[in-house]
Amino acid sequence: MGVAGCGKSSLAATLAQAHQWPWIEGDAHHSPDNRSKMQQGIALTDADRAGWLGQLGQMLTQHEQAASQTPLILTCSALKRSYRDRLRAAAPALRFVFLDIAREEAQARVLARAPQHFFSASLVDSQFATLESPVGEAGVLCLDATLGLDHLHQQVFNWLEEERVLV
């Protein structure tokens, strides 16, 4: 979880590939209206995100109900505590990796990927304005998003082992 440009998808791809864990790319499940708004530089509201969070929650619930022992990766900004709580309600064993990043670095990363991604770089400020830090919440690992992917991968894997998520 984290603001746009923090590296959620890059870290998820690394973890999924290394461990053969299933991965849900949250951005792939935004409605066409939400995608259009973000392309136009219009920040999403709680109401805009409600259906998206509901859909992601359903996918988490289905994975839990399948009683799979394989961790599932979900990339989702989860910027507000209420969004995280909604996802936790769907999957009580859910853990969050918060990729913490400075505004300037996030802006640079979003600008660099602009040709390939629907998210407008003009929305980075709104992401930071919306962000309610999860630091101090149970089941949250905070990492410096500027660390290398190999280092982040190892920290996440070690934490999941310590949390007894990996059995």
Image (cartoon, helix red, strand yellow):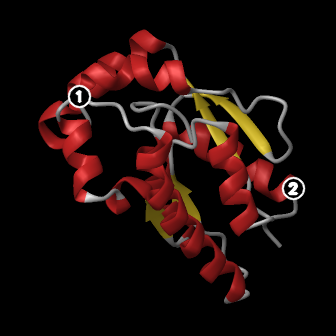
Label number found at residue 41? 1
For the residue marked with disc 2, what is the amino acid?
Glu
Q: Position of residue 92 (x, y in %)?
A: 80, 65
Rendered view: 107 above or below 75: above
- Residue in view at x 73 percent, y 81 percent: 69
Counting other residues with Cα less than 10 Å from the Cα at mark 2, is it few (<14), some (14-19), or many (20 or more)? few
On the question of residue 25 being in view, the answer is yes
Looking at marks 1 and 2 on the same chain, the residue that comes earlier in the sequence is marked by 1
Counting other residues with Cα less than 10 Å from the Cα at mark 1, is it few (<14), some (14-19), or many (20 or more)? some
Q: Position of residue 115 (x, y in %)?
A: 12, 36
Rendered view: 86 above or below 91: above
Which residue occupies the extreme top position in the image? 104
Query: What element does badge 2 sit on?
Result: loop
On the question of residue 118 being in view, the answer is no
Which of the two marks, 1 or 2, is nearer to us in this view?
A: 1
Rendered view: 15 above or below 10: below
- Residue in view at x 41 percent, y 32 percent: 4
Rendered view: 1 above or below 21: above
Query: What element does badge 1 sit on?
Result: loop
Q: Quadrant of the C terminus?
A: bottom right
Q: Quadrant of the N terminus?
A: top right
- Residue in view at x 23 percent, y 30 percent: 120
The answer to which image quadrant residue 166 occupies is: bottom right
- Residue in view at x 77 percent, y 55 percent: 160
Residue that numbered label 2 is attached to:
163
Which residue occupies the extreme left position in the image? 115
Left/right of residue 67 with respect to residue 112 in the rendered view: right
Left/right of residue 147 with respect to residue 30 in the rendered view: right
Left/right of residue 35 with respect to residue 71 in the rendered view: left
Q: Position of residue 47 (x, y in %)?
A: 46, 47
Which residue occupies the extreme front position in the image? 47
Q: CA distance from mark 1 to mark 2?
A: 38 Å
